[in-house]
Image (spheres, grey):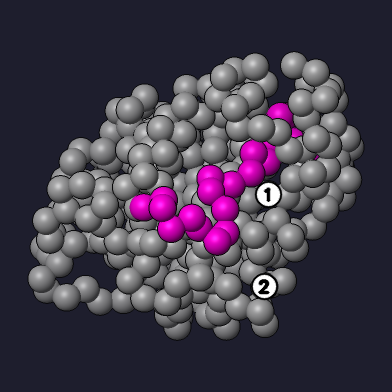
Amino acid sequence: MTAASIRSGAGALGLPAADIGCVVSGSLAADAVIMGLPFDAGVTGVPGQRHGPEIFRKLSPGHDWGVGVDGALGGLIDPLTGGPVLAGRRVFDVGDLGAVPIDPRVGRAAYYRALTGLAERLTRAGAIPLFVGGDHSLTAPVATGLAALHGPVRVVCFDAHCDFSLRPMPALTDITHGDFLGHLLRTGVVSGAELYGVRTLLPASCGPLPPALRCAYTYGFAEAADPVDDEPTYLSVDLDVIDPTEFPATGHPEAGGYRLRELLAAVEHVCRTRRVVAVDLVEALQDDRANRATSATISALVMSCLRALLDDHQGRARGR
């Protein structure tokens, strides 16, 4: 792999960009990749989540990374610790799956199938994918792709809503962003789900909730796995978990949510104490008044996840 295959500074957060084909083929080694999912056909209410990746990229801060010929990062220090940031790690922005506007010939089934296969191939290549959505239905095809390699995965999700229903959902195309967990639990793709930040009520017709689904408002640091829990874990962040006074640009805002600092601390802890194999950040909504704040929030979460996954000493012990 030559330096010509890596486009320094061309990705979100000033990260190098690379073609997804180089990563999944193994010709370009990556510790993690960022990929946009501009898709909101799984939304039952207000659409616009397809613009999330675009908002994130256009307005994210452009850090001045140094990039080696193999894509290894350098050049940044954390003034709070004096230490390097992601030094020697290979993190690439590999673009979007699809584009805005979405080609009307690309239906839900085709998009979900493509995403399922891509999640599996990225995992087999040894890269941790961080997906920026897009609506929350996209968690289901990603989890399905992860399970093809890892077996059933555990979902740790931050969300204002319990996205569960007992209604029949025999295929991915039957799900929505508000009930996909029912399909994943029924099909055995996930071994269990932990939801934090939940503060809304479910209709009785959606229940009863299975024992494998645990809902809470507060993320319990003392109860969370520590030291590293080796079960493959998928971290999913629905941005409506944040209080709408701090993050209004989402389709279903709910009062009484997390502050951003609380959420950052919680996702960092998950990334440090679980074997996280994929991350998604979903449900950011196009809002011309809030786009800059939206990008700043997503950028902070992406950087927090990357540093916890790749800089932390427990991450190195896992060979990442």
Q: Is residue 135 in view?
A: no
Q: Amino acid at mark 2?
A: Asn
Residue pointed to by mark 1: 303
Q: In the displayed structure, does residue 12 sit left or right of residue 185?
A: right
Residue visible at 20% across and 38% down?
188
Q: Nearer the viewer, residue 95 or 230?
A: 95
Q: CA distance from mark 1 to mark 2?
A: 18 Å
- Front in this rendered view, residue 259 or 54: 54
Q: Where is 157 relative to 72, above or below?
A: below
State the residue in front, 93 or 243: 93
* Left or right: where 96 falls relative to 62: left
Q: Position of residue 16 (x, y in %)?
A: 77, 38
- The residue lying toward the viewer, choosing from 145 and 226, is 145
- Is 162 drawn above or below residue 320 in the view shown? below
Magenta segment range? Answer: 85-107
Residue at the disc numbered 2: 291
In the displayed structure, 201 sits above or below 125; it is: below
